[in-house]
Image (cartoon, grey):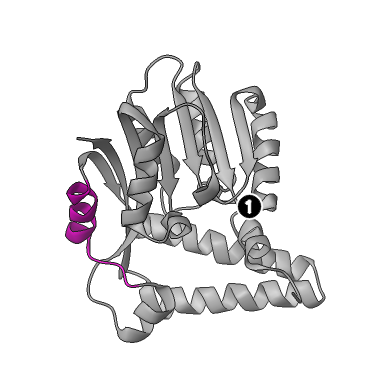
Amino acid sequence: MNGMDRQSLSAIAHHDHPIAAPVFPENLDRLLRRAALPEGARVLDLGCGEAEWSLRALELYPTAVADGVDVSAEAIASAGRAAGARDLYHRLGLHHTPAEKFTAAEPYDLVLCVGATHAFGGLAKTMEAVAGFLRPGGLAVVGEAFWERPPGAELVETIGDYPDLPATVETVEDLGWLTVYAHTSTLAEWDDYEWSWTGTLARWGADNPGPDGDQALAAAKEHRDLWLTGYRGQLGFVTLLLRRR
């Protein structure tokens, strides 16, 4: 393949926003605290990226351990560096493998899958996979996009055919889950995420002249234009805290 692949571009773009979702740190903390994990909790992060959600869970729950799973070698390497810098490496296992192929010998108290439901082929299949990793009474934190209002055909084709928020919640609850808390991302959270994504990639492109830099600049502009002229204020994001019935 010529040039950088999508995973490499994504790793660069998320460097300054390791949460990798339109969620402010204080709202990430609120979701994790509401989970009220037990002593010695086991946490699994499917599609972990730089593992910020797992690392923050380990900081909030000092006796917990976690496994992070991601298909991107760059993201896994970055997660390892972040864990080492925060003295959490011994409590975080990192697995460079597709999320849908990961297996575990023991169940988990909390399974995270935020912005990574595409790995399983959509929200419904993600919920089925997550259920297989949870102990009885365990919780899931799942982040998914939804349309605030009906989009045009071009946006659906480019971004995805997501339902609205009520239908998103109904999908998971029809599969046997209870919504015990949630956070719906604000426009400010979206703006912070998108400006960081596009700006970090553009800055990297300017600092690395040549074919890779040109590709990064083009990708940043294409993404920014799609956001500003397309889905800004129209695409929503909800992070659900869920328990099996």
Is residue 99 something one can see in this rendering? yes
Residue 226 % position (x, y): 46, 78
Please tell me which residue is depicted at 24% across the width and 50% down the height of the picture.
Answer: 172
Please tell me which residue is depicted at 64% across the width and 79% down the height of the picture.
Answer: 218
Which residues, given as a range, are shown in magenta? Answer: 161-175
Residue toward you, 80 or 31: 80
> Under tag 1, what secondary structure?
loop
Residue 178 % position (x, y): 20, 39
Which image quadrant: the N terminus? Answer: bottom right
165 magenta-colored: yes
Tell me where residue 132 sits by quadrant: top left
Residue 137 % position (x, y): 28, 26
Q: Main secondary structure of the magenta part?
A: helix
Please tell me which residue is depicted at 46% across the width and 16% down the height of the picture.
Answer: 40
Tell me where residue 235 sits by quadrant: bottom left
Q: Which residue is mark 1?
A: 15
Which image quadrant: the C terminus? Answer: top left
Specify whether 134 is left or right of 151. Answer: right
Identify residue type, mark 1: His
Q: Residues within 10 Å of mark 1 (few under 14, many from 20)?
A: some
